[in-house]
Amino acid sequence: MIEKIESQGGGRSGGADAGELVAARGLRKTYRMGDRSLEVLRGVDLTVQRGEFVALRGASGAGKSTLLHLLGGLDVPDAGTIHFEGEKLSGRGLSALAGFRNRRVGIIFQAYHLLSDLTALENVALPGRMARMPAGEARRRAQGLLERVGLGERMGHRPNQMSGGEQQRVAIARCLMNRPALVLADEPTGNLDSHTGDEVMSLLLGLREEHAVTLVVATHDPRVASRAGREVHLVDGQVTDAAA
């Protein structure tokens, strides 16, 4: 049995509301493509409370993935600010952002992004080793997480030996390795059939409750969104009908 995650860094609120985990204000992001530019986010405001499950909805190109990437420190905004637990995230250097992601954020991608040369156990343990967790401790925690997601007998398998649903379960286990406060999932059921997708979401929501993490999911699937506590709709790079 995996231990429940204790709240980490709760004392670093920096004056933020006790329930506020992430606060984004005026986020703008433009990508350059040769001599063209594409403005993806156009002044997005969003607040996520600790423990919330928020679904980001919107058509392809509306800015859902970009917003997730900014919240998780995978990319930086051109303008605007992001505060995480009251501390300013925007403006940090790439090295500092990498450390932030490793310690405080778990990310689940549609395409899984597992390392093909590593076993399921090695993939899950990797974030712990990157955080300088002792090898034995990382291995034990990775084993416990894989058992919890139903892959106790698949630990030695590599990604090409597993189904899509199994790979996504490995990705979920990996994202919880370092006890994140925030889990970001980008179309986590997008590559799965409806039955497997429902199973994966049920697992993810169960783990969210067990580990007391905040969950933000970008999804096209209305069934996934219907399970969220709040929906945020993005249209042409702007939030249209959600309380920020």
Image (cartoon, grey):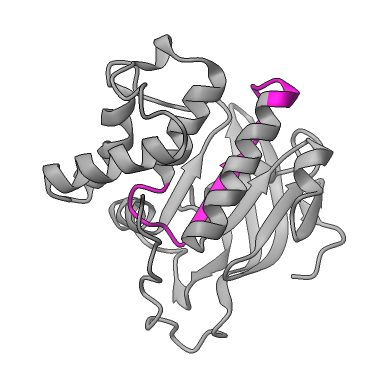
Residue lying at the far front in this picture: please name it: 1
Compared to residue 32, the image places residue 192 above or below, namely above
Q: Quadrant of residue 174?
A: top left
Q: Residue at x 76, y 50 (%)?
A: 227
Q: Is residue 152 above or below residue 185?
A: above
Residue at image point 39% right, 59% down: 104
Residue drawn at x 87%, y 61% as measured from the top left: 241
Q: Is 183 rendered above or below residue 142?
A: below
Residue 77's image quarter? bottom right
Q: Is residue 231 left or right of residue 93?
A: right
Kindly identify the residue that appears in the image at 69 percent across and 44 percent down: 64
Name the dominant secondary structure of the magenta segment: loop
Q: Nearer the viewer, residue 82 or 11?
A: 11
Asked if the stretch drawn in magenta spans residue 186, the answer is: yes
Residue that protrudes farthest toward the right in the picture: 241
Closest to the observer, 106 or 88: 106
Bounds of the magenta span?
Answer: 176-195
In the image, is 14 to the left or to the right of 128? right
> With 38 as the anchor, is 208 left or right in this view?
left
Which percent across, then down, holds residue 162? 45, 15
